[in-house]
Structures are given as structure tokens and as C-alpha cells.
Image: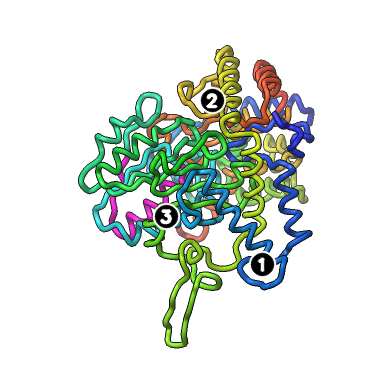
Amino acid sequence: MDPNLKRSIILDNYEDTTNRKDIEDKKYIKHNSRNISCIDNINLYIKITNNTIEDIKFNGEACVISIATTSIMSKLLKGKTIEQAIKIIKNYNNMIEEKEYDSKLLEEANVFNDIYKQPNRIKCATLTWNGLLEELTKYQNGIHN
Amino acid sequence: MNREDFPMLKHEIVYFDNGATTLKPNAVKEAINDYYENYSANAHRGDYKISNIVDEKYEQTRTKVKQLINAKEDSEIVFTSGTTDSLNLIVNGYFKQNLKKDDEVLITYSEHASNILPWFILAKEIGIKVKYIELDQNYEVTIENVEKVITPKTKVISLAHITNVISDVRPIKSISQLAHKNNILLVVDAAQSIAHTKIDVTDMDIDFLAFSAHKMYGPTGIGVMYAKYKLLDKMQPRNYGGGMNAVFTKDGYIELREIPTRLEAGTPNIEGVIGLSAAIDYINKIGIDKIHKYEQELKKYLLEQLNQLDFVEIYNKKAQGSSVAFNIKNVFAQDTSIYLDKYNICIRAGNHCAKILNEATKINNTCRIVLSFYNTKEEIDLLINVLKNIKNIWNEIL
């Protein structure tokens, strides 16, 4: 992908406020990223109905990569079943770790396909994806039911 | 000044993260090498010559530390692994035994985690109360605000000499006078001040002091805890084992060694102590007053230059320490720091372990520059030029 196109997708998502808001609704599962990052502080709000991610919202203070990737994730995984979402997250993580992955599943998230070149940003790129994965796994194990 | 002494500076970096750790001069590296190459033996153990050299160097360092901070006795100096270790030893080795339920400890929102969390844990363990001295509009401690929170139950005031984000210099001497008038003990975290200004524990009448070698051009993993002899003598060792016992018998009878040996169980960090010794010599050779004066000039220049950039917000303009905390408007601190890194300018972004400072400042993350004597006006000019092109940030970091 052309670096300029990548940059504009990242910045568009950084500025996109569609899913960037705090949610009080108790039907949403809340997840905070603070426990694994000293600086990025993002709240994720996940609404799951009938094994499907009905909505993802997020808010907080974080770097451009963290915010942009969370925005992309929130749009990409909306409407997906838990299983589909977990599959996409695993493919995303494989991409970040330079392993084999299916780029067709990742759509705009492909903009981070060379983030491995900046090791100090890998955590920024994966923080909320792994936070979501944790909550989805908990959901599968019945912890959120 | 003295840039040629620092091998790291040959890598063409601009190193402004001196609050996290300082670079090390050749003299420190060479002293540690010398130990491993020429007299590598344990301390306090052997009857052979090289072991005696270790003993001598080890104890000479204690004397050098005593002189550095103007303590009265060598025995008031205890080697630890760093400031965190020293503060934990002070809290757990002394105060856990000497405070009781409802006794009050005064700290502030701008303390580093290592001067907050040990007190929180002690509060949970024995029921002491942690109270906060209010910060003024510049996030500084005034003697009036200290006075305001003192009650008959206040037993300890525990403060950084210079804080690690705001970089305000606390009026330690006045605070200690006030404390002692009220039978309160004073703990001072000198992590951010020891390399920048003179500390005189006798003149300032400090009861406990903590600092690390690595923030004063020495190696990591070694630090100092100072306490007045009469307090140190009542301190409980946290480790029991070799070196610190005088006698023990099969029925459990134990007699411990004298202070400070009984607080340094096990083989000490000998290379660390030797590195610290070289770092003290190095600082003394330049002179702490000269360092202080130069860093103050540089800080003034940095502030003047940053002030000219209307997109820079500075949070500690009034502070007297050698650091500046700032943000670029509408740019997250970490993004600024990654942008500067593209030009090999090293700064720190984040909350700097002062996680409750935001209660006072309402700002969660900042960029922090802490200056050292090896920094230059030319480096500041480079920083300013790079910041002037901040509009390129996304092209540079994405």
C-alpha cells in the first residue's frame, strides 16, 4: 500500500469520532487498557447480543497509532460473531508479528502491516485488540453472561 | 561541558532524559572494569591482598557518600539497590516498627510512586493515615501549606527534594525546622536532586534520605539510604544472612553486627559501589556548584526558546529544577516524543510514575526534558528547530 494512502487512512481514523465516546449503558462491557500500558489509557465499550458484536465504542488518551487502530477495529468488528471477531484479531496479531495471515480479513487494518519495523509501536498497535480479545474470550467462557 | 567524557554522546544523540537516568562517563566504566580486571574478589571476606583492596574501596565509598551529603558518620550510609529500595527500607525497616494506628504521614500529589506506594501499603498493614500537603497554583509546596495539615498525630513528612515532573525545589530546611518543632521525622527523596544541587543533610537536618547512583552518572542497581545514627540503630534489617550477623547458635540465638553492616546482608553490589565512587569523584572534579549554575543557565535558555513557540504548553515555568514539562497543543505526549526520536532527540513522555499528580494539574501525560551539564545550547537549538516543523509530525512518524 502506498505510504501516503496508509498515512491518510491512519489520520482519518485518528480524527474519526464516530465510535469515540464514553458509554454509560450497562449493557456494554467496559475494558480499560491502563493495566498493561503506562501511558495509553483507552476505555473500550463492547455490546454483545446473541453471540454477535452489536457495537464497539471507545474513548481515552493515547497515541495516534493506538487511537487509529482502535477506530479501525471498532468499525471492522461491528456485526461480527464472536468466532469471526476472534479469527480477525488473531490474523491481525499474526500480521503484527510478521507471521502468516489473511489480509482480506483485515481491510483498513492492513495499514499496520509494517508496524513491526517500529518495535516501540507494536504495543500501541495491539493494545486494544488484545483487550477486546480478552473480553471476547471471557464472554465465550461464560464470564460475562 | 565535559562531553568528551561520555561515550554515549558519540552516537550523535541528544539526550534530554536525564531524569530517567544519566549517561555514564568513561571514569565510571573504567572503575568497574578495573575492579573486574585487577582486584575481583568479594568484600569483607578474605585475608588475601585483592580482597583487602575491595574492602578498602567499598568502605572508602561510604566515606565519599558521607562527604557528598555532609553526614556526620560513615555508619549513617547504607548501600541499597536504588531510591525505591531505600524508601521501602525506610518505611518497612523503621516506620513499620515505630508508627502506630492513626499516626499520620504527609506527602503530596506530585511524589513519585516509590514515595507513595510504600506508605499506602503501610496504611493497609498497620492503619496509619496518608495525608496530602496541598500544592499551590504552581504545584509547589509552601511552608504555610505544610503547617496547615500538621496535627498532633503527624509523625512523618516524606517529600521529594526536587519532584520529577514539576521539578520544583522544596524548602527542605524550613520544612525540617517545622517538622522537628512538632516532633515529626523528615524523609527526603533526593533521586532528582542529587546530581543537580548540593545536599547537606546536617544543615538541612534531614532524618532519612534516599537516592540512586544511576541518576548521578553512576551505574544502575546501586543507591544510598542515609539516616541519622540514632534512627538507623533502631532499623530492622530486611534481609538476614551472611555478613550481617556476629554470632548465632543452634538454638536460634542471634547477635547482629553493628550499623550499617547489619543492614547490608549478603554479598553487596561491589561493582555498583565502585562505580558510585567513581561517579562521586567525577561530580566533585567538576564541582556541584558549577554543574548547578550551568544547568540553570541552560534551563533559562530552554524556557526562553520554548516560550517563543505558541503551540507549546509549559506546565512548570516557575520551577527551579533543571527540567521542563510540556506538551505540543493537540498532540499526544508520546507522539511528540516519537517525533523527536526521528531526530535522535531522547525525551520522556508519560506520567513519569507520578500517577496522582493529575489530581492537581488535570494533565495526565507530559513530555519531560531534564537537563544535564553535558547538554548544550546547540542541542536546545536543534530541539527548537525540530519542534518548529511539528506540522510534519504525521509524515515523520506514520
Q: Which of marks 1 and 2 is nearer the N terminus?
A: 1
How far apart, in angstroms, are the residues tagged by discs 3 and 2?
Answer: 33 Å
Percent x, y for residue A74? Answer: 56, 38
- Which quadrant holds the C terminus of chain B? top right
Looking at the rendered structure, the secondary structure element under dot 1 is loop
The image's colour scheme reads rainbow
Percent x, y for residue B164? Answer: 50, 36
B150 or B287: nearer the viewer:
B287
Q: Which of marks 1 and 3 is nearer the N terminus?
A: 1
How far apart, in angstroms, are the residues tagged by discs 1 and 2?
Answer: 46 Å
Q: Identify residue for label 2.
A: B326
The residue located at (24%, 34%) in the rendering is B148
Q: Are marks 1 and 2 on the same chain?
A: yes
Q: Do labels 1 and 3 share a chain?
A: yes
Q: What stretch is highlighted in magenta?
A: B112-132
* Mark 2, other Cα within 10 Å: few <14 / some 14–19 / many ≥20: many
Q: In front of the other: label 1 or label 2?
A: 1
The residue located at (40%, 39%) in the rendering is B204
Q: Identify residue for label 1.
A: B42
The residue located at (30%, 35%) in the rendering is B146
Which kind of residue does numbered mark 2 sit on? Phe
How far apart, in angstroms, are the residues tagged by discs 1 and 3?
Answer: 27 Å
Taking the image as shown, residue A69 lies to the left or right of residue A116, namely: left
Which kind of residue does numbered mark 3 sit on? Ile
Q: Identify residue for label 3.
A: B90
In the rendered structure, the residue with mark 1 lies on which chain? B
Picture disc at residue B211: none
Looking at the rendered structure, the secondary structure element under dot 2 is strand
Percent x, y for residue A103? Answer: 74, 42
